């Protein structure tokens, strides 16, 4: 198997060789653009020359040609001075430009790339966290009733739980159980921070840290800081919201791989596009590249990136203008825009950020630094977005988000001429569940259905909680009859699930209405049609799936 670092090193070596072969032509292009300006002076021609030199200044050192970058930076500085005056270059400036062009030729004539050792960037989409796939949980709390109630809640969702009311018993058990998640109270009779101290001792004896979630009646900084130092993954204050705790456990134990980070790179330099794409792809990211900023719209909608990485100086539309346009698109107001440019002028960098950018990286940038900057920004944005667009109980898209997603998917299906189905699901007689077994049991039923939908549907399908006991599903690339077949199998599986409340078992059914864009062409009509089909299913006796007819 090829070592990742070796594979990346080879890709970058080939890119550097290709870059070196094209250097003479690039310098000839700069010389020709300058001669045309001298023959007929115009501001557009000067801006085009500046962009070309700026690109060379940023790319030279990236590919190991440090001297080329130094000379190009000097030439760029002279051109910026001419641009500020908005008048044709003086004789002295002309002489300076010509001298720098000759210096570029000289540097290129004996240039050879300086090969640097490149470490393969760490994979950002790895599925291997220490807790992946774990289902065993230790609940450690000296309050017997609280611990048993928490254990009961966790067992409803498939977790194997052991309860410890004493720290000495827990210490013995955890030594014999390497793969476990710990839910640890902080306060015990022997010490207010005894739980934190116990976990520190446990962590010191382990090669891989134990995933631990702390639970406490205290919400002060000292308690939280102690928990962090003991390796906490999360911190909950009593009384604990079971839904939020289970969401955290589900995130820790999920066997589903994290969705790869999606990065859109916009740069008119083909060499830089190839370089940065290779680095980010090596780190496990999905990359789409655009060399012409005027053609970004289709890619932006189709690719739906987590982050946009763009140069500032590009033809027809510069990066700052493009950021302003993107910020006026409703679905992309919050997408991170990171500038990647050779621009070293701090005032220019601040201008770029103030007009819609989120960060500014200066070329050349080390591969690991690029990956780290992009990954940390995406991780933070995904976390914040999840709070805004997801339902707190189920983790599914909330009402507003699923409607926005339906609008986007309908437009995409029409553009690609592919089928699409939309379904509305409702748990039958849900009020009776709450009245008979309590709202906690009702929450567990809702969560069970959300889990079933996520398990049985494809990754390309989109699931949301529409409100209360009502769910919505967008089935991409699927027509109405096929959607009915899939959802009917889910209906049958859900009806066979047994739910538990105070040692009483009960089952619940669901009804479903389906519509497709072959008969209902926009998001409003397809949503109304699915809703009416759901009503028909209810009227016809419930526990069935109905396909909307035009």
Image (spheres, rainbow, N blue to C red):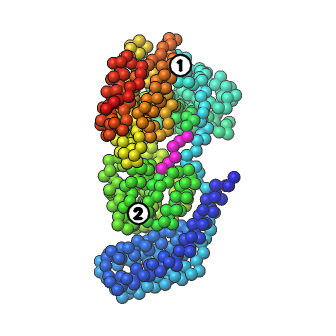
Q: Residue at x 49, y 33 (%)?
A: 457
Quadrant of the image occupied by residue 463:
top left
- The residue lying at 45 percent from left, 78 percent from top is 29
Q: From the image, which quarter does the C terminus lie in?
A: top left
Q: Secondary structure at mark 2?
A: loop
Membership of 261 in magenta stretch: yes
* 395 relative position to 19: left or right: left
Question: Number of callouts in the render?
Answer: 2
Mark 2 and mark 1 lie on one chain; the one further toward the N terminus is 1
| Quadrant of residue 44 within the rendered picture | bottom left
Compared with 82, 503 (above or below) is above
Q: Decide if residue 501 is in sight here.
A: no
Q: Which residue is mark 2?
A: 292
The span from disc 2 to disc 1 (Cα, nearest Å) is: 58 Å
CB-based contact (under 8 Å), mark 2 and mark 1: no
Numbered range of the magenta stretch: 257-262
Of residues 81 and 158, which is closer to you in this image?
A: 158
Q: Position of residue 474 (x, y in %)?
A: 41, 36
Label 1 SS: helix
Dominant SS type (magenta): loop
Q: Is residue 114 visible?
A: yes
- Which residue is more in the foreground, 129 or 344? 129
Give the answer, above or below, for where 2 lies relative to 12: above
Residue 496, horizontal then vertical, whole percent: 51, 19
* Residue 453, x across and y down, in percent: 47, 30
Q: Is residue 138 above or below residue 264?
A: above
Residue picked out by circle 1: 152
């Amino acid at each position: 198997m090829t070592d990742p670092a070796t594979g990346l090193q080879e890709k970058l070596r080939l890119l550097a060789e290709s870059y070196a072969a094209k250097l003479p032509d690039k310098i000839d292009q700069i010389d020709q653009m300058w001669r045309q300006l001298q023959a007929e002076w115009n501001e557009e021609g000067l801006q085009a020359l500046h962009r070309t030199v700026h690109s060379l200044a940023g790319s030279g050192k990236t590919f190991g040609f440090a001297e080329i970058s130094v000379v190009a930076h000097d030439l760029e500085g002279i051109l910026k001075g001419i641009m500020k005056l908005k008048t044709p270059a003086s004789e002295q400036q002309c002489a300076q430009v010509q001298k720098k062009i000759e210096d570029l030729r000289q540097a290129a004539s004996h240039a050879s790339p300086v090969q640097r050792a490149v470490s393969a960037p760490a994979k950002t989409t790895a599925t291997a966290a220490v807790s992946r796939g774990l289902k065993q949980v230790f609940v450690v709390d000296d309050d017997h009733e609280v611990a048993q109630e928490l254990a009961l809640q966790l067992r409803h969702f498939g977790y194997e739980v052991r309860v410890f009311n004493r720290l000495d018993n827990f210490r013995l058990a955890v030594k014999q159980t390497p793969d476990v998640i710990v839910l640890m109270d902080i306060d015990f009779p022997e010490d207010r921070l005894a739980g934190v101290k116990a976990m520190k001792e446990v962590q010191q004896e382990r090669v891989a840290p134990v995933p631990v979630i702390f639970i406490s009646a205290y919400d002060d900084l000292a308690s939280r800081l102690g928990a962090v130092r003991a390796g906490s993954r999360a911190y909950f204050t009593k009384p604990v919201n079971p839904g939020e705790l289970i969401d955290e456990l589900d995130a820790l134990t999920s066997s589903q791989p994290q969705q790869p980070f999606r990065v859109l790179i916009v740069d008119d330099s083909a060499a830089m596009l190839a370089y940065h794409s290779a680095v980010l792809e090596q780190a496990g990211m999905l990359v789409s590249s655009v060399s012409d900023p005027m053609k970004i719209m289709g890619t932006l909608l189709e690719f739906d990136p987590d982050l946009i990485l763009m140069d500032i100086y590009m033809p027809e539309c510069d990066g700052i203008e493009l950021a302003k346009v993107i910020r006026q698109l409703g679905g992309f107001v919050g997408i991170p825009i990171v500038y990647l440019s050779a621009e070293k002028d701090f005032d220019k960098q601040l201008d770029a950020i103030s007009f819609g950018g989120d960060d500014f990286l200066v070329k050349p940038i080390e591969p690991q630094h690029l990956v780290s900057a992009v990954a940390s920004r995406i991780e933070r944005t995904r976390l914040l977005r999840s709070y805004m667009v997801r339902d707190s109980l189920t983790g599914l898209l909330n009402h507003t988000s699923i409607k926005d997603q339906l609008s986007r998917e309908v437009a995409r299906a029409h553009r690609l001429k592919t089928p699409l189905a939309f379904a509305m699901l409702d748990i039958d007689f849900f009020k009776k569940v709450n009245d008979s077994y309590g709202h906690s049991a009702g929450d567990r039923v809702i969560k069970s259905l959300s889990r079933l939908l996520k398990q049985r549907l494809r990754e390309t399908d989109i699931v949301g909680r529409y409100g209360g006991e009502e769910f919505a599903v967008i089935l991409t690339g699927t027509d109405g009859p096929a959607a009915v077949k899939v959802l009917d199998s889910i209906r049958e599986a859900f009806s066979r699930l047994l739910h538990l409340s105070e040692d009483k078992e009960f089952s619940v059914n669901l009804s479903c209405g389906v519509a497709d864009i072959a008969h209902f062409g926009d998001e409003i009509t397809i949503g109304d049609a699915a809703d009416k089909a759901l009503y028909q299913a209810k009227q016809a006796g419930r526990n069935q799936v109905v396909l909307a007819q035009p």
